[in-house]
Image (cartoon, grey):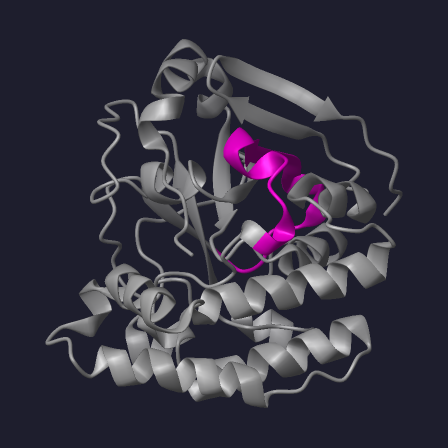
Amino acid sequence: MIKEHPIEKYIHSIVVNESFFQKYYFHSVIDLNLIKVDSILKNGILTKQEIEEKKLLATYTHDARAFLSKNGRQFVSLTRYPEDIIFSPVFESFTLHTLSSISFMVDKSISISREGERQTYFDDEVFHKGGIARDKLKGILLPEHLTHKPICQIPFLALDLSCYTETYLENLIAYLERYFGKKIEKYPFMESLQQFWDILDEYEKPEQWINAILEDQEEKYGKDIRDMLSFLFEQLWSDYIGIANPTYIDVLKYLRPEIPIYELQEKGIQKIKETSRSF
Protein backbone atom coordinates (compact mmCIF):
# COMPACT_ATOMS: atom_id res chain seq x y z
CA MET A 1 0.00 0.00 0.00
CA ILE A 2 1.51 3.30 -1.13
CA LYS A 3 0.79 6.74 0.30
CA GLU A 4 -0.83 9.06 -2.20
CA HIS A 5 0.83 12.29 -3.30
CA PRO A 6 -1.81 13.78 -5.64
CA ILE A 7 0.02 17.08 -6.07
CA GLU A 8 -1.37 17.99 -9.48
CA LYS A 9 -4.94 17.56 -8.24
CA TYR A 10 -4.69 20.48 -5.81
CA ILE A 11 -2.55 23.03 -7.65
CA HIS A 12 -5.43 25.10 -9.10
CA SER A 13 -7.29 25.18 -5.78
CA ILE A 14 -4.18 26.33 -3.93
CA VAL A 15 -3.24 29.02 -6.44
CA VAL A 16 -6.70 30.64 -6.33
CA ASN A 17 -6.72 30.48 -2.51
CA GLU A 18 -3.19 31.71 -1.85
CA SER A 19 -4.34 34.19 0.80
CA PHE A 20 -5.74 31.32 2.89
CA PHE A 21 -2.44 29.41 2.88
CA GLN A 22 -0.35 32.52 3.51
CA LYS A 23 -2.12 33.10 6.85
CA TYR A 24 -0.68 30.02 8.59
CA TYR A 25 2.25 27.75 9.21
CA PHE A 26 1.44 24.05 8.83
CA HIS A 27 2.50 21.07 10.91
CA SER A 28 1.83 17.76 9.15
CA VAL A 29 1.25 14.38 10.76
CA ILE A 30 3.06 12.56 7.98
CA ASP A 31 2.32 9.02 9.19
CA LEU A 32 -1.41 9.96 9.26
CA ASN A 33 -1.74 8.53 12.78
CA LEU A 34 -4.96 9.85 14.32
CA ILE A 35 -3.77 9.02 17.83
CA LYS A 36 -1.10 11.69 17.31
CA VAL A 37 -3.84 14.04 16.11
CA ASP A 38 -5.77 13.34 19.32
CA SER A 39 -2.66 14.03 21.41
CA ILE A 40 -2.05 17.37 19.65
CA LEU A 41 -5.68 18.38 20.17
CA LYS A 42 -5.30 17.74 23.89
CA ASN A 43 -1.73 18.90 24.50
CA GLY A 44 -0.63 21.12 21.62
CA ILE A 45 2.31 20.31 19.35
CA LEU A 46 5.07 19.20 21.70
CA THR A 47 8.77 18.58 21.25
CA LYS A 48 10.22 15.15 21.96
CA GLN A 49 11.63 16.42 25.24
CA GLU A 50 8.24 17.73 26.38
CA ILE A 51 6.49 14.48 25.39
CA GLU A 52 8.99 12.46 27.41
CA GLU A 53 8.81 14.79 30.42
CA LYS A 54 5.01 14.53 30.45
CA LYS A 55 5.21 10.75 29.92
CA LEU A 56 2.76 10.95 27.02
CA LEU A 57 2.19 8.36 24.32
CA ALA A 58 4.68 8.81 21.50
CA THR A 59 6.19 7.13 18.49
CA TYR A 60 8.75 9.14 16.59
CA THR A 61 8.67 9.03 12.81
CA HIS A 62 12.31 10.08 12.85
CA ASP A 63 15.08 9.64 15.37
CA ALA A 64 17.13 12.84 15.51
CA ARG A 65 20.20 11.06 16.88
CA ALA A 66 20.30 8.17 14.41
CA PHE A 67 18.77 9.69 11.29
CA LEU A 68 19.71 13.38 11.60
CA SER A 69 16.09 14.44 11.75
CA LYS A 70 15.43 18.17 11.95
CA ASN A 71 12.36 17.70 14.17
CA GLY A 72 14.30 17.03 17.34
CA ARG A 73 14.17 17.21 21.10
CA GLN A 74 13.69 20.97 21.39
CA PHE A 75 12.18 22.04 18.07
CA VAL A 76 8.90 21.64 16.19
CA SER A 77 9.06 21.45 12.40
CA LEU A 78 6.68 23.65 10.39
CA THR A 79 6.18 24.57 6.78
CA ARG A 80 5.10 27.87 5.27
CA TYR A 81 3.41 28.50 1.95
CA PRO A 82 6.26 29.80 -0.24
CA GLU A 83 5.59 32.89 -2.33
CA ASP A 84 7.60 31.39 -5.18
CA ILE A 85 6.08 27.92 -4.93
CA ILE A 86 6.97 25.50 -7.75
CA PHE A 87 5.08 22.47 -6.39
CA SER A 88 8.17 20.32 -6.05
CA PRO A 89 8.21 17.50 -3.47
CA VAL A 90 12.01 17.60 -3.62
CA PHE A 91 12.42 21.22 -2.53
CA GLU A 92 9.16 22.04 -0.72
CA SER A 93 7.84 20.43 2.44
CA PHE A 94 4.49 22.11 1.74
CA THR A 95 4.21 20.13 -1.48
CA LEU A 96 5.56 16.85 -0.11
CA HIS A 97 3.77 16.76 3.26
CA THR A 98 0.93 19.29 3.47
CA LEU A 99 -0.69 18.10 0.24
CA SER A 100 -0.58 14.43 1.22
CA SER A 101 -1.08 14.46 5.01
CA ILE A 102 -3.38 15.83 7.66
CA SER A 103 -1.95 19.13 8.91
CA PHE A 104 -2.50 21.56 11.75
CA MET A 105 -2.81 25.24 10.82
CA VAL A 106 -0.63 27.28 13.18
CA ASP A 107 -0.92 30.98 14.06
CA LYS A 108 1.93 32.94 12.48
CA SER A 109 2.48 34.99 15.63
CA ILE A 110 4.93 32.36 16.94
CA SER A 111 8.68 32.80 16.58
CA ILE A 112 10.51 30.76 13.94
CA SER A 113 14.02 30.04 12.72
CA ARG A 114 15.52 28.38 9.65
CA GLU A 115 17.38 25.80 11.72
CA GLY A 116 16.15 23.17 14.14
CA GLU A 117 18.34 20.27 15.19
CA ARG A 118 20.12 21.05 11.94
CA GLN A 119 19.58 23.14 8.83
CA THR A 120 16.59 22.12 6.70
CA TYR A 121 16.81 20.58 3.23
CA PHE A 122 13.48 22.15 2.22
CA ASP A 123 13.25 25.75 1.01
CA ASP A 124 9.99 26.35 2.91
CA GLU A 125 10.59 24.51 6.20
CA VAL A 126 10.97 26.51 9.42
CA PHE A 127 11.25 25.64 13.10
CA HIS A 128 9.84 26.80 16.41
CA LYS A 129 11.87 26.22 19.55
CA GLY A 130 9.70 24.58 22.19
CA GLY A 131 6.13 23.33 21.95
CA ILE A 132 3.20 25.12 20.35
CA ALA A 133 0.19 25.71 22.62
CA ARG A 134 -3.32 24.61 21.66
CA ASP A 135 -4.54 28.20 21.37
CA LYS A 136 -2.10 28.71 18.49
CA LEU A 137 -3.82 25.94 16.49
CA LYS A 138 -6.34 27.60 14.19
CA GLY A 139 -7.60 24.65 12.17
CA ILE A 140 -6.98 21.30 10.55
CA LEU A 141 -6.30 20.95 6.83
CA LEU A 142 -7.44 17.63 5.36
CA PRO A 143 -6.89 16.83 1.65
CA GLU A 144 -10.03 15.30 0.16
CA HIS A 145 -8.29 12.13 -1.02
CA LEU A 146 -8.08 11.19 2.68
CA THR A 147 -11.48 12.38 3.93
CA HIS A 148 -13.73 9.43 3.13
CA LYS A 149 -11.07 6.77 2.64
CA PRO A 150 -11.55 3.67 4.80
CA ILE A 151 -8.98 3.34 7.56
CA CYS A 152 -7.95 -0.04 6.13
CA GLN A 153 -6.81 1.71 2.93
CA ILE A 154 -4.57 4.30 4.59
CA PRO A 155 -0.86 3.52 5.04
CA PHE A 156 0.27 4.36 8.57
CA LEU A 157 4.03 4.26 8.10
CA ALA A 158 6.05 7.13 6.68
CA LEU A 159 8.49 6.44 3.86
CA ASP A 160 11.47 6.59 6.18
CA LEU A 161 13.58 3.51 6.80
CA SER A 162 13.63 4.32 10.53
CA CYS A 163 9.96 3.27 10.65
CA TYR A 164 10.71 -0.21 9.30
CA THR A 165 12.72 -1.56 12.22
CA GLU A 166 11.87 -4.06 14.92
CA THR A 167 12.32 -1.41 17.62
CA TYR A 168 9.97 1.05 15.93
CA LEU A 169 7.34 -1.63 15.34
CA GLU A 170 7.52 -2.89 18.92
CA ASN A 171 7.17 0.68 20.20
CA LEU A 172 4.21 1.29 17.87
CA ILE A 173 2.39 -1.85 19.03
CA ALA A 174 3.00 -0.97 22.70
CA TYR A 175 1.69 2.53 21.94
CA LEU A 176 -1.48 1.09 20.37
CA GLU A 177 -2.00 -1.31 23.28
CA ARG A 178 -1.80 1.56 25.75
CA TYR A 179 -4.13 3.88 23.83
CA PHE A 180 -6.80 1.31 22.99
CA GLY A 181 -6.42 -0.81 26.13
CA LYS A 182 -6.07 -4.05 24.16
CA LYS A 183 -3.41 -6.73 23.88
CA ILE A 184 -2.04 -7.13 20.34
CA GLU A 185 -0.33 -10.28 19.08
CA LYS A 186 3.03 -9.06 17.70
CA TYR A 187 4.16 -12.14 15.79
CA PRO A 188 2.25 -11.59 12.48
CA PHE A 189 3.63 -8.06 12.24
CA MET A 190 7.19 -9.11 13.04
CA GLU A 191 6.90 -11.85 10.41
CA SER A 192 5.74 -9.29 7.85
CA LEU A 193 8.58 -6.96 8.83
CA GLN A 194 11.07 -9.79 8.30
CA GLN A 195 9.64 -10.33 4.82
CA PHE A 196 10.22 -6.64 4.13
CA TRP A 197 13.85 -6.87 5.25
CA ASP A 198 14.48 -10.07 3.27
CA ILE A 199 13.46 -8.16 0.15
CA LEU A 200 15.32 -5.02 1.24
CA ASP A 201 18.62 -6.94 1.29
CA GLU A 202 18.37 -7.19 -2.49
CA TYR A 203 18.51 -3.39 -2.89
CA GLU A 204 21.78 -1.46 -2.99
CA LYS A 205 20.28 1.76 -1.53
CA PRO A 206 17.07 0.63 0.21
CA GLU A 207 16.29 4.02 1.78
CA GLN A 208 15.60 5.30 -1.76
CA TRP A 209 13.40 2.36 -2.75
CA ILE A 210 10.94 1.78 0.09
CA ASN A 211 7.92 2.00 -2.22
CA ALA A 212 9.45 -0.57 -4.55
CA ILE A 213 10.22 -2.91 -1.63
CA LEU A 214 6.62 -2.62 -0.40
CA GLU A 215 5.32 -3.37 -3.89
CA ASP A 216 7.59 -6.42 -4.11
CA GLN A 217 6.38 -7.65 -0.72
CA GLU A 218 2.73 -7.24 -1.70
CA GLU A 219 3.28 -9.08 -4.98
CA LYS A 220 5.15 -11.93 -3.29
CA TYR A 221 3.07 -12.34 -0.12
CA GLY A 222 -0.28 -10.74 -0.96
CA LYS A 223 0.14 -7.89 1.54
CA ASP A 224 2.94 -5.70 2.84
CA ILE A 225 3.73 -4.47 6.35
CA ARG A 226 1.71 -1.31 5.77
CA ASP A 227 -1.35 -3.38 4.81
CA MET A 228 -0.98 -5.39 8.02
CA LEU A 229 -0.92 -2.25 10.16
CA SER A 230 -3.79 -0.60 8.27
CA PHE A 231 -6.09 -3.55 8.92
CA LEU A 232 -5.03 -3.49 12.58
CA PHE A 233 -5.82 0.24 12.85
CA GLU A 234 -9.20 -0.35 11.24
CA GLN A 235 -10.08 -3.09 13.72
CA LEU A 236 -8.92 -1.03 16.71
CA TRP A 237 -10.70 2.16 15.68
CA SER A 238 -13.86 0.27 14.71
CA ASP A 239 -14.11 -1.26 18.19
CA TYR A 240 -13.17 2.03 19.85
CA ILE A 241 -15.70 4.32 18.16
CA GLY A 242 -18.39 1.70 17.48
CA ILE A 243 -18.51 2.12 13.70
CA ALA A 244 -17.93 -0.72 11.24
CA ASN A 245 -15.45 -0.01 8.45
CA PRO A 246 -14.67 3.52 9.69
CA THR A 247 -13.33 6.18 7.36
CA TYR A 248 -10.67 8.74 8.20
CA ILE A 249 -13.26 11.47 8.76
CA ASP A 250 -15.35 9.13 10.95
CA VAL A 251 -12.47 8.86 13.41
CA LEU A 252 -11.55 12.54 13.15
CA LYS A 253 -15.14 13.55 13.92
CA TYR A 254 -15.17 11.17 16.88
CA LEU A 255 -12.16 13.03 18.30
CA ARG A 256 -14.29 16.21 18.16
CA PRO A 257 -11.65 18.87 17.54
CA GLU A 258 -12.66 22.30 18.77
CA ILE A 259 -10.81 23.93 15.89
CA PRO A 260 -12.43 23.88 12.42
CA ILE A 261 -11.58 21.29 9.79
CA TYR A 262 -10.98 22.51 6.25
CA GLU A 263 -11.09 20.07 3.38
CA LEU A 264 -8.68 20.87 0.57
CA GLN A 265 -10.61 19.98 -2.55
CA GLU A 266 -9.73 19.90 -6.22
CA LYS A 267 -11.96 22.93 -6.80
CA GLY A 268 -11.63 24.84 -3.56
CA ILE A 269 -11.51 24.74 0.23
CA GLN A 270 -14.57 23.72 2.24
CA LYS A 271 -15.11 23.99 5.98
CA ILE A 272 -16.52 20.56 6.73
CA LYS A 273 -17.17 20.47 10.47
CA GLU A 274 -18.25 22.74 13.24
CA THR A 275 -16.58 21.84 16.50
CA SER A 276 -17.95 20.80 19.86
CA ARG A 277 -15.04 19.76 22.06
CA SER A 278 -14.18 21.92 25.05
CA PHE A 279 -10.55 22.01 26.19
Q: Left or right: 54 with respect to 131?
A: right
Q: Can residue 215 be seen in this view?
A: yes
- Is 130 one of the magenta-colored residues? yes
Query: Percent from the top left, x then y, of residue 139?
Result: 65, 33
Measuring 52% from the left and 60% from the top, which residue is drawn there? 156
**Above-or-below relation of 145 to 164:** above
Quadrant housing residue 96 = top left
Q: Left or right: 174 with respect to 4?
A: right
**Above-or-below relation of 193 to 5:** below
Nearer to us in this view, 211 or 123:
211
Chain part drawn in magenta: 129-152
Measuring 67% from the left and 54% from the top, which residue is drawn there? 40
Query: Percent from the top left, x then y, of residue 61?
Result: 45, 67
Q: Left or right: 121 with respect to 56?
A: left
Q: Which residue lies furthest to the left in this view?
A: 204
Measuring 68% from the left and 59% from the top, which residue is drawn there? 234
Nearer to us in this view, 277 or 77:
277
Q: Left or right: 264 with respect to 181?
A: left
Q: Can residue 61 be seen in this view?
A: no
Q: Count the numbered circles shown.
A: 0
